[in-house]
Amino acid sequence: MYSKVHLRYVIILKMKYILSFLVCFYWSKLNAKQDLSKSLIIKCEETTGTGRSDIFRIHNPYFEWYYKGKWHEIGYSKKGAAKDWIVNFNKNIITLHNKKTNWNRLINLKKMTASMLFPTGEKYLYNCIFIDK
């Protein structure tokens, strides 16, 4: 049959596989869905033309845009420019629509990409990263 040393080796090896599987499983679950109950800050850099970037602070139902050194609320408030925006949160997808200009933005927190579509049909694509501001 098998020696005690061999059995211990097999048990340890199996435990390593199980442990590594559990770590990978929980890590993927953790990264698959962002917790929008906490404030997230992302920077999205445009990849299809101007090279501009936008910084957003996301805390469902609040959505803010960092512009000229200040945070500007978008969508939740009915004051200022925020009243023109409709913001929807759906798992890892955030959609924004500006009623006044007919601009549409989509942010995918799982893929860390974004897009901006203008009424002219012009579309900008973005790559996003998490940052601390």
Image (tube, rainbow, N blue to C red):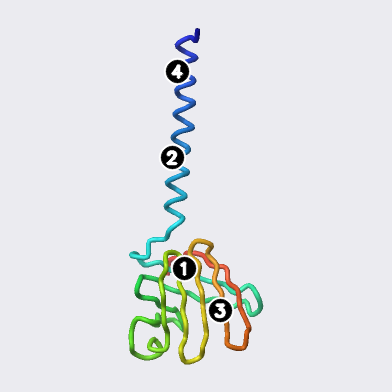
Say which residue appears at 45% left-offset and 18% top-offset: 8
Rendering quarter of residue 19 = top left
Q: Secondary structure at mark 4?
A: helix
| Mark 1 crowd level (few <14, some 14–19, many ≥20, 10 Å Cα) | some
Percent x, y for residue 2? 49, 10
Q: Secondary structure at mark 2?
A: helix
Q: Could you tell which of marks 4 and 2 lies nearer the N-terminus?
A: 4
Q: Could you tell which of marks 1 and 4 lies nearer the N-terminus?
A: 4
Give, as a three-letter code, the residue at label 3.
Met
Asked whether 95 or 112 is in front, the reply is 95
Give, as a three-letter code, the residue at label 1.
Ile
Give, as a three-letter code, the residue at label 2.
Leu
Percent x, y for residue 89? 41, 71
| Mark 4 crowd level (few <14, some 14–19, many ≥20, 10 Å Cα) | few
On the rendered structure, is 30 left or right of 106?
left
Q: Secondary structure at mark 3?
A: strand
Give me the disc on residue 8.
4
Q: Could you tell which of marks 3 and 1 lies nearer the N-terminus?
A: 1
Q: Distance of mark 3 from mark 1, alpha carbons?
A: 14 Å
On the rendered structure, is 110 left or right of 122?
left
Q: Which residue is mark 3?
A: 116
Percent x, y for residue 21? 47, 38
Q: Could you tell which of marks 2 and 1 lies nearer the N-terminus?
A: 2
Q: Which residue is mark 1?
A: 93
Total labels: the figure holds 4
| Mark 3 crowd level (few <14, some 14–19, many ≥20, 10 Å Cα) | some
Instruction: Give the mark toward the camera: 1 or 4.
Output: 1
Q: Which residue is mark 2?
A: 22
Q: Distance of mark 3 from mark 4, alpha carbons?
A: 58 Å
